[in-house]
């Protein structure tokens, strides 16, 4: 999938008929007809972002979005309130002294300026430091006619602005890499190299990765093992690694970037046992950020207003958080308590944050190739930097990076700690039309405790942050 600035484009998707698919994902890499990579081939990595709606000269309020588009949209203060963070801010827990590392191909040529306008508009302090590096090689000059560069510029904007929203006093280290899209040979090795460099030469508390590749598009398990160097380095350095779980629900695209698998699949690196996989929820908030209903699993697939706003048609289109069982990794020890859900496989996601397009966030950007101004953005690309900010707050309390937090998350859920908010409604089943046929890929439903749709749930930051600092610190 390739993203334009104003519209998330999904190739080959239109109406719905009657075919349903229920098969479980039991295939191995290089063993499906949906486009698995042959040895030595490239693997498509996609930013987990939906950049939607018309650009405006000012941020759009919730009431305006609901009136104009029949969907909700939110501003930073609403998300801060939704995750119960103001009490932490008043006590000085703002992320000060921590560093959030954000990794994106190409970056954005206007991110420093755009963050300044974003902060001024929403009365946020500037981060103590916003540093941009390219340790894997010089990034090519920005080309506004290159859709990949324009899409990644939008991704960078979202990542930086909303990690900063949650941890306003954290330092931000933006790591840009010079190759995108074909990642099995070119891009992913550069990402790994860049992250290894950061882990060796910079202080980092959490690394936020809003991209992934479908597991079955890798040539082999060995090819994935060869790309895990940064994850092992983060484990040794006690740095938390986060990855978005995807925006296509139980489905995901094959090697050609447009054809969906006809059975549930997952993606890497969120499926890596050394990584925390971030799923998506839908918030329901009033103008002040108070909850008007409990969070549910993000799934806009069957919402006509959302399809019209995001895709320009009536749908259904796959538009939901990823989740499921890995075909690359077996169940890690920290998931033994949920083996009745995951079986013998690594299950994802681990935890979820706001990602719904009906509940999108206002972002500001001025890079060429797209109209300058304010627009709405959504996806697990939103959820991941949001959670990176939460981790930074906990690292500030602990006084050091927290490392792999997954064992702590599952313990917090098991013991019913107040910081974990259960997500018990919704699913990531999606429908679409492909090659003249309509399909429904049945995914997973939310439930009390752990689910393959929402992980252990979402967070109440006032309690979650100190609890995480105590258990993972």
Image (cartoon, rainbow, N blue to C red):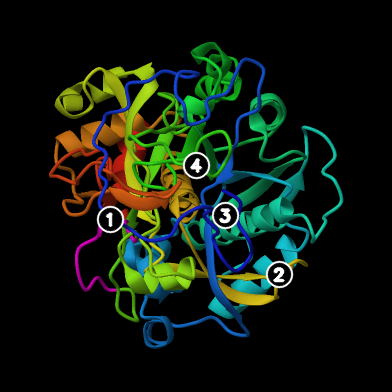
- Distance of label 1 from label 4 (alpha carbons): 38 Å
Q: Let me know if residue 1 appears in the view.
A: yes
Count residues near mark 2 (Cα–Cα under 10 Å), then give few for <14, some for 14-19, many for 20+: some
Residue 332, percent from left and from top? 32, 19
Q: Which residue is mark 2?
A: 370
Lower position in the chain sequence, tag 3 or tag 4: 3
Q: Which residue is mark 1?
A: 460
Comparing marks 2 and 1, which lies closer to the viewer?
A: 2
Lower position in the chain sequence, tag 2 or tag 1: 2
Q: Magenta includes 296?
A: yes
Q: Let me know if residue 123 appears in the view.
A: no
Lower position in the chain sequence, tag 4 or tag 2: 4
Q: Which residue is mark 4?
A: 259
Tell me where the magenta segment starts and ends, as one range: 290-300
> Would residue 68 appear left or right of 230 to someone viewing this image?
left
Examine the image and state in which quarter residue 370 appears: bottom right
Q: Is residue 40 above or below residue 400?
A: above
Residue 199, percent from left and from top? 64, 28
Which of the pair 408/397 is nearer the observer?
408
Q: Is residue 292 above or below residue 437?
A: below
Q: Is residue 457 above or below residue 346?
A: below
Examine the image and state in which quarter residue 100 appears: top right
Q: Which residue is mark 3?
A: 159
Q: Magenta includes 419?
A: no
């Amino acid at each position: 999938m390739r993203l334009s600035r104003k519209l998330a484009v999904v190739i080959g998707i239109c109406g719905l008929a009657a075919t349903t698919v229920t098969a479980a994902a039991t295939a191995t890499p290089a063993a499906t007809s949906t486009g698995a990579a042959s040895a030595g081939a490239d693997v498509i990595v996609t930013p987990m972002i939906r950049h939607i709606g018309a650009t405006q000269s000012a941020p759009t309020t919730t009431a305006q979005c609901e009136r104009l588009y029949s969907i909700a949209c939110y501003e930073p203060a609403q998300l801060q309130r939704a995750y119960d963070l103001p009490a932490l801010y008043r006590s000085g827990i703002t992320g000060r002294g921590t560093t959030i590392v954000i990794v994106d191909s190409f970056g954005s040529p206007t991110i420093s300026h755009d963050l300044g306008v974003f902060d001024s508009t929403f009365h946020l302090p500037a981060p103590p430091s916003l540093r941009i590096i390219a340790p894997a090689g010089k990034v090519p000059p920005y080309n506004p006619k290159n859709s990949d560069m324009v899409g990644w510029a939008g991704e960078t904007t979202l990542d930086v602005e909303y990690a900063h929203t949650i941890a306003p006093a954290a330092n931000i280290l933006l790591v840009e890499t010079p190759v995108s899209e074909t990642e099995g040979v070119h891009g992913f090795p550069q990402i790994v190299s860049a992250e290894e460099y950061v882990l060796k030469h910079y202080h980092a508390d959490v690394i936020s990765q809003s991209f992934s590749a479908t597991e079955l598009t890798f040539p082999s398990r060995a090819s994935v093992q060869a790309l895990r160097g940064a994850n092992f380095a983060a484990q040794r350095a006690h740095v938390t690694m986060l990855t978005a779980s995807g925006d296509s629900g139980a489905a995901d695209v094959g090697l050609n970037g447009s054809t969906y698998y006809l059975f549930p699949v997952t993606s890497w690196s969120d499926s890596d046992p050394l990584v925390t996989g971030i799923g998506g929820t839908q918030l329901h908030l009033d103008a002040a950020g108070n909850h008007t209903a409990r969070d549910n699993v993000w799934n806009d697939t069957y919402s006509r207003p959302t399809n019209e706003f995001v895709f320009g048609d009536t749908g259904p289109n796959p538009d939901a958080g990823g989740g499921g069982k890995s075909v690359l990794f077996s169940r890690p020890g920290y998931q033994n308590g949920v083996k009745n859900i995951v079986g013998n496989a690594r299950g994802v996601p681990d935890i979820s944050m706001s990602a719904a397009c009906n509940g999108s966030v206002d972002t500001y950007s001025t890079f060429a190739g797209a109209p300058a101004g304010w627009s709405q953005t959504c996806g697990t690309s939103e959820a991941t930097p949001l959670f990176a900010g939460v981790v930074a707050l906990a690292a500030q309390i602990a006084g050091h990076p927290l490392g792999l937090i997954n064992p702590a998350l599952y313990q917090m859920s098991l013991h019913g700690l107040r910081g974990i908010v259960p997500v018990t409604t919704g699913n990531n089943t999606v429908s679409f039309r492909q090659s003249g046929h309509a399909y429904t890929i049945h995914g997973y439903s939310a439930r009390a405790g752990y689910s393959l749709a929402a992980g252990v749930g979402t967070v109440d930051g006032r309690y979650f942050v100190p609890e995480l600092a105590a258990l993972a610190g």
